[in-house]
Image (cartoon, rainbow, N blue to C red):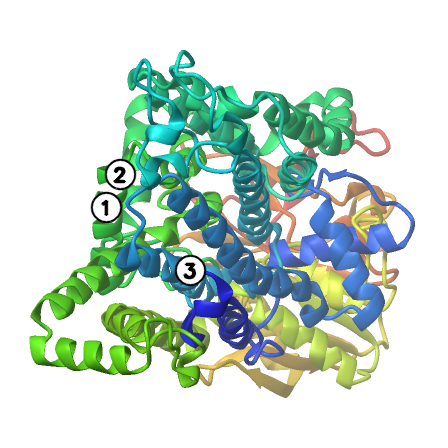
Amino acid sequence: MDSQRRPWYLNPWLHLALILVVAGFFRLWQIGSLPPGLFGDEATDGLDALDVLAGRGAVFFPANFGREGLHIWLVAGAFRLLGITPLALRLPSVLAGILTGLATYWLGCELMAAWRRRTPEDQGLQRTLLSFIPLIAALYVSTSYWHIHFSRFGIRGVFTPLCAALAFAAFWRAINLGDKALGDAPPRIEWAPGIRSAQLPAARTNRVPARLANRPAELTRIPQAQAASPSSIAWFAISGLFLGLSLHFYTASRFLPFFLAGFLALEWLSARLRGRQAESLSSRYWRWILLLYVVAGLVFAPLALYFLQHPGSFSQRASAVTALGSGNPLERMAQAALANVLQFFVPGSGDTAQFYNLPGRAVFDPFSAVLALLGILTLLWFWRQPVALFLLAWWPALLLPSFLATDRFPTLPRVLGTIPGVFFFPAAGVALLGGGLAWAVNRLLPTAQARATGTQEQAAGPTGPDRRLGGAPRSSQLSLLRTAAPLLAVGVLALLIHAGLAYRDYFGVWASSPATFDAFEGDMMAASGWLAAHNPPGHVYLSSDIYRHPTFMLLHEQATVTRYFQQQDPQLSWFDARVSLPLPAPDEPATYLIAASSPAGELARDTLAREGTVRDHVLGPDGKPALTVVELQPGPATVGASGAISFTDHLRLTGAAWAAGSDAQPELRLRWHTTGPQPEDWAGYRLELAGQASTGADWRASVPFDGFRAPEWVAGGGFLTSHTLDLAGVQMPRVLRLRLVHADSGEPLTFGAVSDGWHQVIVQ
């Protein structure tokens, strides 16, 4: 269908504009406030981006199990333009999400062009159906809850579908241009002996390259070209460029080159089984496919060099989540495979992680799931078509990461590489259903209307156009409209359901959930915002469930990963209120920020209730405090003292007492005095205790001691700790032996004449 005869609703520029508007709306609407807060993985990428801005950029960043670096460089650029904000951090993902919708359309156009060139029976109905599939697939991507979620999430995984769409669109563009240079699709006819091409029917001779039109019939098959056009070669190189770039974004992208190679091998095998090996893509374009991989390898080379120099980094993340460490890896992988397949189709079977999904939500809504299954069946029917085989192979090939990494399943991040290929399944289903309705409409159309149409066409003359219909004959336009209308109806219905449910589930259900606020570290955002708006007196103590939480460290401290544990704000210290409470130096007031993720335990709650004053609350979406601000005046309460014992030159134990814990377990409460921070001991300690039961038997226990870590200690201050002990059948002893050991090495702290670290303590 040439551009002069194309109806307005098949105009590709109109399609692109529609995709841009829809994709942009779902990714930009309320982007300043949703997602709420800033997830820790996002913040870690931001901390690395600060290293880039400080001149310490790299191709790979080892923090957080290691991450490829290109996304972090893009975040650094956004920080440079917009400042260090959640919006700036998420902007690269937002733009990648919008571009993926447009790239999907381009990919679809190239795929359908390749399909048409290899289908001799390409007539009106089929041509119209193929013209709509790219638009439907792109709108499915644009309105997918799954893709919307990750497009608004500042992590690198969303770049995998973008690079895949661009790489494969360029690949099929190269194939289409190569085929066009030959004059037509790969030949399927054999010349009978003694017959020249001029004697063949017109429908066949127009498929023979002009240079062979009058060649003798001794050539029983049209020779295949051994060279492609310059433009085709260029697109092969561009495909390699995007394929190589994908490897700089996300670990799962490493499967993309293997998928392309596997598809080419399958397509070659399919052609060989049909006796058409020479017509396979790999046979016809093997030189330029090799060029594609060479370009991809050159683009990947800096990262490959890094992995050669740091071999552990290549498999750092994979080794932590692989099924090979489980007792029965094959069974575990089978369970993961089933779960990750079902999450696409079965309601309630989706990823359960709040920060990756509306827990349990399947990728497809029920109607789209049915359409996707119809689409899969349609592609299976045409499996000999290279395009159908390509789409069928894409989905399982890029599901493989989720089959191999089995620490949790189902999982959506690890299967992002199936986008956008998987959304061609419901698009094909829409085409099948809409095409069936169009066929029925054309079959059942009253003959009187057909005769009337024919009469009008005769009155206009044999070639007379109706200029109101774009220059095409009225009968042709009406035929196209009858074909397109049922397809449009099915497509619009499917996409409205898909988009409506995605809007409801993301902007309504998921966005307003208190669990979402918690998952995206809303309390740390609240702490950062409160400190930015206030100037509290004295020392500030921030309670968090994660030591030096990356969300706060990015937004408030603006620390880099390189200086993450060395940077110290002298007016702020971290602690965990569930097991400890810092005490300010004498005559110094203190402000405590108690985050909802680490609420005050009994010891901290009792002490602050006696000595402190609640100054403020920052409420979460459920109306409960996400952050509680308490002021403490000088002279806080203490537990009984039994003499000071020095553990280091910065830490002394000044008191110990027994208390009854909330679960009737004995709780040991200790009071400590500090003379200043010990930055080198950021990993924390463990507390080892030993004693003797009334029966004479010895007992020993080990408990964490990281509620208030050494880099946070204040000169002249102190802290309280509480430790719940399992002393079943043992009376709370008055005399204990205890020592501190390094959490990372297990070596005891020795100070002065104490060689083994043990100290004897009298407990009140």
Where is residue 408? Give x, y as percent: 40, 42
Decide which of tag 3 and tag 1 comes sooner along the chain. 3
Where is residue 253? Give x, y as percent: 56, 38
Q: Is residue 615 visible?
A: yes
Where is residue 527? Give x, y as percent: 67, 74
Q: Name the residue under label 3.
A: 1
- In the shown orientation, is residue 26 left or right of residue 711? left
State the residue in front, 563 or 474.
474
Q: Mark 2 falls on what kind of element?
A: loop
Q: Name the residue under label 2.
A: 382
Where is residue 168? Give x, y as percent: 54, 42
- In the shown orientation, is residue 362 left or right of residue 629? left
Q: Mark 1 falls on what kind of element?
A: helix
Check the picture and name the quadrant holding the N terminus: bottom left
Q: Which amino acid does label 2 sit on?
A: Phe
Q: Mark 3 falls on what kind of element?
A: loop
What crowding class fits label 3: few (fewer than 14 Cα within 10 Å), some (14-19), or many (20 or more)?
few
Q: Which of marks 3 and 1 is in front?
A: 3
Tell me whether the residue at label 2 lies in contact with that at label 1, contact meaning CB atoms closer than 8 angstroms.
yes
CA gap between label 2 and label 3 equals 23 Å
Q: Name the residue under label 1.
A: 378
State the residue in front, 452 or 602.
452
Quadrant in the rendering for residue 400: top left
State the residue in front, 686 or 496.
496
Residue drawn at x 33%, y 43% is: 340
